[in-house]
Amino acid sequence: MNDSAFHYVDGALHVEGVPAASLAEQFGTPLYVYSRDALTRAYRAYADACAGRKATVHVAVKANSNLAVLNVFARLGAGFDIVSSGELARVLAAGGKASNTVFSGVGKSAAEMREALEAGVKCFNVESIPELHALNEVAKSLGKKAPVSLRVNPDVDAKTHPYISTGLKSNKFGVAFGDARATYREAHDMANLDVVGIDCHIGSQITEVSPYLDAIDKLLDLVEQIESDGMSIRHVDVGGGLGITYDDETPPDIGDFVRTLLAHFEERGHGQREVYFEPGRSLVGNAGVLLTRVEYLKPGEEKNFAIVDAAMNDLARPAMYEAFHRIVPVMERKASARLYDVVGPVCESGDWLGRDRELAVEQGDLLAILSAGAYGFVMSSNYNTRARAAEIMVDGERARVVREREEVKQLFAGESILPD
Ligand code: LLP
């Protein structure tokens, strides 16, 4: 299992102290289930390694924006990283503070900038010169100064899936490294901007430390140049991106990762610099599973299919990135296993959740799709007019609904037909 919160007791999968089968019985399937303990341990691993240093953790809301999940982190003192005013509203509703929130994203609208400035966010991670101008204008209209950091594209290879690699020249993100120094001067000259930091985010599901060290080296070279130009950079935001174990990946342990990066700042003579982290997946990914029930088994000449009640609309990652998620039985069976493709009911061949999986299953059995806490529910859709799954948080022996299952009538509540 990819996190100790999910474990078998006498052949029955448990989430902390609760049998997964009883959750499925009580709340139905497909069902996202999170473990408060796993969320807490992952956050503490970051926070403990930051202790005693000027280093702070900003949870990337995009990975899992459920209010209960955000609230677990807010109670632990987390900051947040948002990419829309919608995510800002969630942070505030979950008890997070705007003053502890950084606003990332390549296409912030003027309205979003206004909301975030009025709320008092800690920093705007700006990605282009036109965005600097837009933010300066909005800040001027409100009589405020907007705290800014430039997202610099360090052009390092994060060695991850091309769709989730963001630090290369060919990506849409950030200010090109070669333009950054001049862009800082430009920002500095704008009356309603306050240059406070620098940031990067080189990709996601990164399982090695070296791309980070390369990126930090480039950023610190730039910081030295910018400061020699007379500006002061208070913080360096290294982004998120630390990978998790889905299958047989061996990413660095969170604490080791943080300590290695912070040590690198010291080695470079920047030990006093404030460092921000923006982790998403490594906080929530292995803290959640998706429970699903086998509707039908369909043996075939070339393939056997296990058709389950979860689909690509519930968990898009396999269809979208050919991502691997372990799939395990909720009740272990002694029977011999066969190879199955685990697929959903959506009318697309791309609707698969796992391929060539060895499973001992029968119709009606429950399966758990592991490592589904990050980019799972948040990327789900209503394709095929499928209502989205419920979300549950387990805390010890207790389980609570933290998002009700959608009802079909909600899906077209805002639609109307022509009068004539
Ligand atoms: N900061 C910024 C600016 C980001 O763009 C992201 C993620 C993060 C932090 C958090 O990265 P993490 O620690 O979660 O890797 N949907 C894809 C992942 C997209 C990641 C987008 N950016 C997936 O399912 O693999």
Image (cartoon, rainbow, N blue to C red):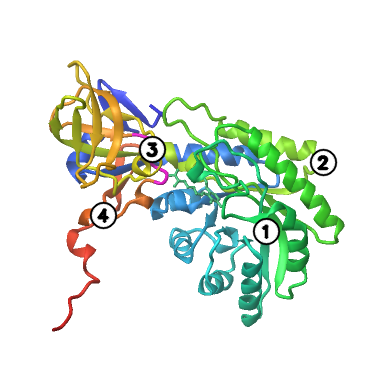
**Residue type (three-letter) at the residue carrying disc 3:** Glu
**Do the numbered discs 3 and 4 sit on residues whose CB atoms are within 8 Å?**
no
What is the span of residues highlighted in magenta in the rendered image? 370-375
Structural distance between the alpha carbons of marks 4 and 1: 37 Å
Of the two numbered discs 4 and 1 on the same chain, state the one appearing first in sequence: 1
Please state if 108 lies on the left or on the right of 129 as rendered: left
Q: Quick check: can you spot residue 239?
A: yes
Of the two numbered discs 2 and 1 on the same chain, state the one appearing first in sequence: 1
The residue wearing badge 2 is: 269
* Of labels 3 and 1, the one closer to you: 3
Please state if 390 lies on the left or on the right of 318 as rendered: left
**Residue type (three-letter) at the residue carrying disc 1:** Leu
* Of labels 3 and 2, the one closer to you: 3
Q: Is residue 176 above or below residue 140?
A: above
Few, some or many C-alpha atoms within 10 Å of disc 4 (few <14, some 14-19, many ≥20)? some
The residue wearing badge 1 is: 150
The residue wearing badge 4 is: 383
The residue nearer to you, when weighing 33 against 360, is 360
Structural distance between the alpha carbons of marks 3 and 4: 19 Å
The kind of secondary structure element at disc 4 is helix
The percent position of residue 363, horizontal first and vertical second, equals 13, 31
The residue wearing badge 3 is: 322
The percent position of residue 257, horizontal first and vertical second, equals 61, 34
